[in-house]
Image (tube, rainbow, N blue to C red):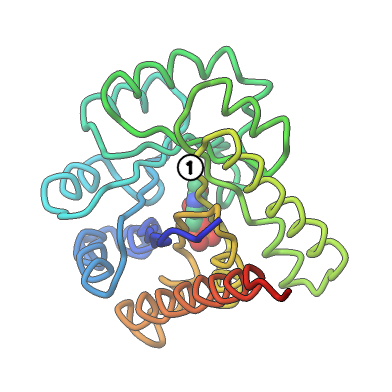
Amino acid sequence: MTAPPIRLGINIDHVATLRNARGGVHPDPLRAAKLAVEAGADNITAHLREDRRHIRDDDIRRLMAELDCPLNFEMAATDEMRAIALKVKPHAACIVPERREERTTEGGLDAVAQFDALVPVVADLTDAGIQVSLFIAAEGRQIEAASRLGVPAIEIHTGAWCDALADGRGTDAESEWQCIKEGAQLAHGLGLEVHAGHGLNYETAETISALPEIVELNIGHFLVGGAVFEGLGETVRKMRQAMDKGRQAATQVRTIENVDLA
Ligand code: PXP
C-alpha cells in the first residue's frame, strides 16, 4: 500500500502538570497547544483524568473555544467523562483505561473484558459525531473487539516497545515491534484507522512512521520534557521532521520493492 500522510498529535498534559505544581496559571496549556500547532502539530490531545491531576475542565473548555485544530479528548469510559464529552463535543475521543495510582496510562484498554460496558459509551459518543478511538495493545483479540464495537479508529499502545528499547532488552523490543507491525496490518485490514502513541521519541517516531497503516502519532512527555532544553516549537519541528523522514524512507523502500526487475 502507498503510505498516506501521517498526522502529529501533541499531548499537552504535562504542561498542565508543571502549571499545577505551583497552582497558578503558568505555563498555560492553551498557549503551548497554539505554539505546537504553529510548529507543525496537526491536532492536540488532552487527557481529563478523574483526579484532574493535570488537565482541568476549564482547560478543555478553553482548548475547544480557542484552538483552530481538532481536539482529541482522552477519557476513561466513566459516566462523568461521557457526560463531559457529550457536552464539549470534541472532534475525537480516545478511550483509555485509568487507574488513580498509575503515573501514566500504563497498559491498553481491555476491550475484550469491558466489551459490554463499552457498547453504550461508544454508541453515545458516535451518535454525537465524535470520532471514537480505543487505546489498546496491539493484540489480535483486542483489535478484533474494537472492530466489533464499531469504532472507526484504534490507538496502538507503543509503551512496551519503547520501554524495551530504552532498557536495552533487544529480544523483547523485537517481539513488541512485530506485534505492532502485525497489529497495524490487522487493524487496517479490518477497516480501522490506526493511530499509535506512548513513550515515543525522535528515533521511535521515525521508525514507526515507516508503517504505512499508521496515520497518526500522539506524543507528549518526550516533547514537553525536551522543551525545557530546546523550546517546544523546536521539539515539535524536530518530531515532524523525524516522522516525515521515516515516512519518506518507507515510501522509497516500497517504490523500489515495486520496481519490475524482470
Ligand atoms: N496516547 C495516549 C492514549 C496516552 O494516554 C498518552 C499518555 O498520556 C500518549 C499518547 C502520549 O504518551 P507520551 O506522553 O508518553 O508521549
Question: What residue appears at the point 34 percent right and 83 percent down from the top-left corner?
Answer: 234
Image quadrant containing the N terminus: bottom right
Q: Position of residue 97 (x, y in %)?
A: 56, 35
Instruction: Give the residue pinned by disc 1.
Output: 193
Left or right of residue 209: residue 54:
left
Question: What residue appears at the point 46 percent right and 54 percent down from the top-left corner?
Answer: 215
User: Mark 1: few, some, or many residues within 10 Å (few <14, many ≥20)?
Assistant: some
Q: Which kind of residue does numbered mark 1 sit on?
A: Glu
Left or right of residue 215: residue 253:
right
Q: Position of residue 248 (x, y in %)?
A: 50, 75
Q: Residue furthest right?
A: 171
Q: Quadrant of residue 112?
A: top right
Q: Position of residue 175 (x, y in %)?
A: 82, 57
Tag 1's secondary structure?
strand
Q: Position of residue 200 (x, y in %)?
A: 56, 66
Left or right of residue 194: residue 67:
left
